[in-house]
Image: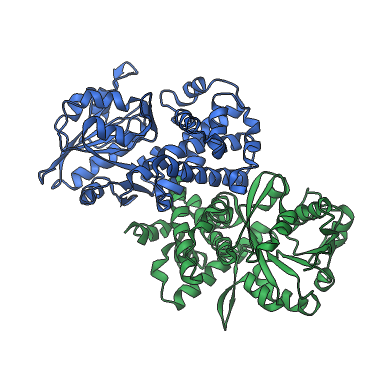
Chain colours: A green, B blue
């Protein structure tokens, strides 16, 4: 990137995408020496109450479907065509469900600036036949040929949109981007810490969604705070172990950042995967049906990630080392009765 | 200790003391090859509904005041005289409010076996004019001249008493005690991990009570899970830093045990110091008055510990390095308005 003003594009517009567009839209105005003040937001077009969602966002400055009652800055412009949205952008903020990343990048590939910077806010892995599970940032980086940072933290979207104080973790290998990233994301209520361990931060963001389901299961079963704390701790230990074997990354400091223990705790108390865990105990319905009933259009990332992790662990003969992550996957697929969840944990390797 | 059967005494009988007496009472029966089956529990005598509390416990096998509706094993015998209770004991389990430890030990001093083992379940520091703040286990150990282990974890007493699954951390310098400690405390719902870092485990147990008040303050102010997660994480960072400067102990692994992150999370969601934090926001009453209204006889340890920590930090010119712990103390003393709590955290050293 050169020193001219940077153009920013937000690729995605769910509740988290809309909440981050609010921050970014305001910050480019506050730093108009560094950024172009117009921010394009790619919106997957839908008809809402007889109107196009992009038209509603551009006239009412509100994503009425995914982040209702929050005003977006008027300089955030909804664009239904991802190619037009990303055209000429220097900074691409990815905030899509992880299963749509690859196809979206392939559409954008021919049209982006070669020296653009990607920033992934996506929490999940990408599973391919040929390569097994991969980090989303790596898929973006390799598909588009650009450097990709990540942003993960204890950031439930609705609370961020309501400007309640929180922290986040940004990871970028290239330290020279730090001032740019801080200017783009930091506010008095959204405190950013920039570190280098991209893979570690991203693994935290994916794995915590699975543990969040486990927290919901113990809630659904009527256990209290002690049991939930045990699930959170055992989950954290399995997250650390998985990160070590999967990434060859034994840097534990990342788990003390907002993306680590803080995001895990927030997810296990207020996240949507926790809701799913609770529902799985209280109903025998299929996961996809529960998703439709509870989220009305959003998706639970947790069960997909649990499946991806399970597949990795199975291929590497490590199932018995991760009883919590494995039990959650099997409960989601209805192979294991959720009432047996705690029995899966009583003789956890951590107690030995 | 020799290989003859060990006699166990529980010194204290609040809600946690009674809950642990239930476990210990059952475990000495299950391991009657290792332990004398009679367990004396020292009970500070009170009159409850016109009867002595010790008489009620010994006839109804229930601590109706501090742990109602939970049956204690009949082999747990309430004794109102601490000297009689500890006489001939090989294992002394301390579970009193921390401000009564020193005087209780002084009473017992002449009467205990010289090779007894102490185990402290007490969460706090002891502040003396001459020595500043000290670990409770050290005060027990030095006053009585016995080795002292500790047991700390995500163990809200009522949930343990209801046999909901949880974990705990036991720390003992002398590894040869591990089988004895495991036999005494472990059950299918109360999983014990025995490690060596006594001071680190004990510091966690004390410090988390202060952070728990902070969690209650953000609840009282109407913040959500993101903000609470930030308080928990910043609290954890200050706990680690305090442990390092106070104990010269930089072993971070202890924070990943049940006594660390798990106990912190449980305390910040279900603990009594969290309740206090919430009350401090909603009322301008003095802390001691709130204690009387909310706890009816139990005590909040958090404000006392916050004061002890504050005094240590002030003496060592380190106040500005611990903005969260300091703000909580000043809110408890009413020097700072709880509505300013988040402002104390916006520019936390962890964000720099």
- Percent position (x, y) of residue B309? 46, 33
When asked about the image quadrant of residue B137, the answer is: top left
- Percent position (x, y) of residue A148? 67, 69
Horizontal arrangement in the rendering, residue A190 relative to residue A133 (left or right): right
Instruction: Identify the residue shown where x is 39% and y is 33%.
Output: B125
- Percent position (x, y) of residue A155? 64, 52
Tag count:
0
Which one is nearer the viewer's eye here, A56 or B139?
B139
Viewport quadrant of the N terminus of chain B: top left
Q: Is residue A262 visible?
A: yes
Which one is nearer the viewer's eye here, B270 or A25?
A25
When asked about the image quadrant of residue A78, the answer is: bottom right
Instruction: Identify the residue shown where x is 65% and y is 42%.
Output: B346
Horizontal arrangement in the rendering, residue B143 relative to residue B339 (left or right): left
- Percent position (x, y) of residue A161? 73, 49
Instruction: Identify the residue shown where x is 34% and y is 27%.
Output: B64
Vertical position of residue B95 compared to residue A181: above or below: above
Q: Is residue B162 visible?
A: no
């Amino acid at each position: 990137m050169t020193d001219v003003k940077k153009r920013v594009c937000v690729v995605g517009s769910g509740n988290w995408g809309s909440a981050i567009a609010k921050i970014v839209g305001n910050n480019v105005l506050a730093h108009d020496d560094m950024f172009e003040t117009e921010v394009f937001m790619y919106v997957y077009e839908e008809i809402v109450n007889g109107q196009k969602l992009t038209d509603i966002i551009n006239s009412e400055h509100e994503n009425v479907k995914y982040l209702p009652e929050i005003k977006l800055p008027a300089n955030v412009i909804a664009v239904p065509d991802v190619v037009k949205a990303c055209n000429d952008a220097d900074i691409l903020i990815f905030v899509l469900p992880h299963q749509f990343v690859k196809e979206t990048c392939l559409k954008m590939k021919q049209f982006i600036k070669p020296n653009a910077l990607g920033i992934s806010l996506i929490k999940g892995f990408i599973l391919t036949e040929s390569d097994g599970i991969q980090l989303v940032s790596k898929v973006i980086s390799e598909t588009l040929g650009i450097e990709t940072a990540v942003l993960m933290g204890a950031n439930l979207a609705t609370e961020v949109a309501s400007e309640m104080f929180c922290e986040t973790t940004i990871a970028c290998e290239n330290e020279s981007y730090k001032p740019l990233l801080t200017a783009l994301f930091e506010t008095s209520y959204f405190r950013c810490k920039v570190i280098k361990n991209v893979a570690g931060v991203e693994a935290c963001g994916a794995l915590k969604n699975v543990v969040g389901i486990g927290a919901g299961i113990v809630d659904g079963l009527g256990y209290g705070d002690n049991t939930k704390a045990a699930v959170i701790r055992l989950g954290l230990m399995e997250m650390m172990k998985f990160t070590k074997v999967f990434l060859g990354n034994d840097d534990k400091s990342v788990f003390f950042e907002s993306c680590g223990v803080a995001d895990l705790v927030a997810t296990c108390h207020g996240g949507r995967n926790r809701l799913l865990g609770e529902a799985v105990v209280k109903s025998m319905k299929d996961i996809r049906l529960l998703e439709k009933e509870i989220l009305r259009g959003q998706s639970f990332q947790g069960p997909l990630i649990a499946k991806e992790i399970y597949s990795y662990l199975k291929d590497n003969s490590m199932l018995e080392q991760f009883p919590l992550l494995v039990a959650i996957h099997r409960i989601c697929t209805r192979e294991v009765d959720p009432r047996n969840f705690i029995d899966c944990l009583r003789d956890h390797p951590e107690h030995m």
